[in-house]
Image (cartoon, rainbow, N blue to C red):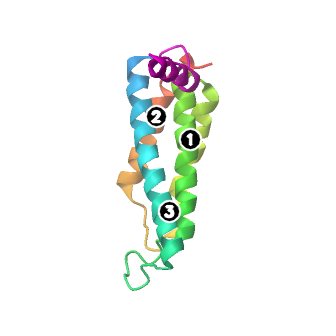
Amino acid sequence: METKKTVKIVKYLILGKHKPTPILRVLCWFTIIWDTLIAVYMAGSGLFFLMESQSFSNNELLKDFNQEFCFTYSFIHGISLISAILIYRMKRTGFFIYVTANIAMLITLFIYIERFRSDYITVSFTLIMIGLFATRLKKMT
């Protein structure tokens, strides 16, 4: 019984007391799961590079995939995760943080990875997600 109470309190503290609209709930949960997975993966990759002192310097496609890129990208996904939680709580600042973090992710790819060109799928997905969140901006406080 005690664990159920604890879970309920943690859920209330993180997600708030008001549930957003169903479409916003789906978008937020997708973003929360996606950002968590990518942040953990990139942080793990960065730690691997740090501890093993290895890199992909012999691979032409992955030679720019280094620990600095991994930690930076993980940090930006962490910020995006926090913004998704704020959006779930219906906070307008969460949307603006989300937009900033996602644009920073695209710029980070161009800065760190030399061979990264304008990938239309990545840019389109980012703009679609920002647009879907923007449709619910009026209901946020």
Please give the label number shown on residue 131: 2
- Looking at the rendered structure, the secondary structure element under dot 1 is helix
Position of 49 with respect to 91 (left or right) is left
Number of the front mark, 2 or 1: 1
Q: Which residues are magenta?
A: 1-19
Residue 129 rendering spot, x and y as whole percentages: 43, 38
Residue 44 position (above or below residue 53) = above
Amino acid type, residue under disc 3 in the picture: Leu
Q: How many marks?
A: 3
Discs 2, 3 touching: Cβ within 8 Å: no
118 inside magenta stretch: no
Amino acid type, residue under disc 2 in the picture: Gly
Please give the label number shown on residue 109: 3
Which badge, 2 or 1, is on the more N-terminal residue? Answer: 1
- Looking at the rendered structure, the secondary structure element under dot 2 is helix
Residue 124 rendering spot, x and y as whole percentages: 39, 47
Position of 100 with respect to 60 (left or right) is right
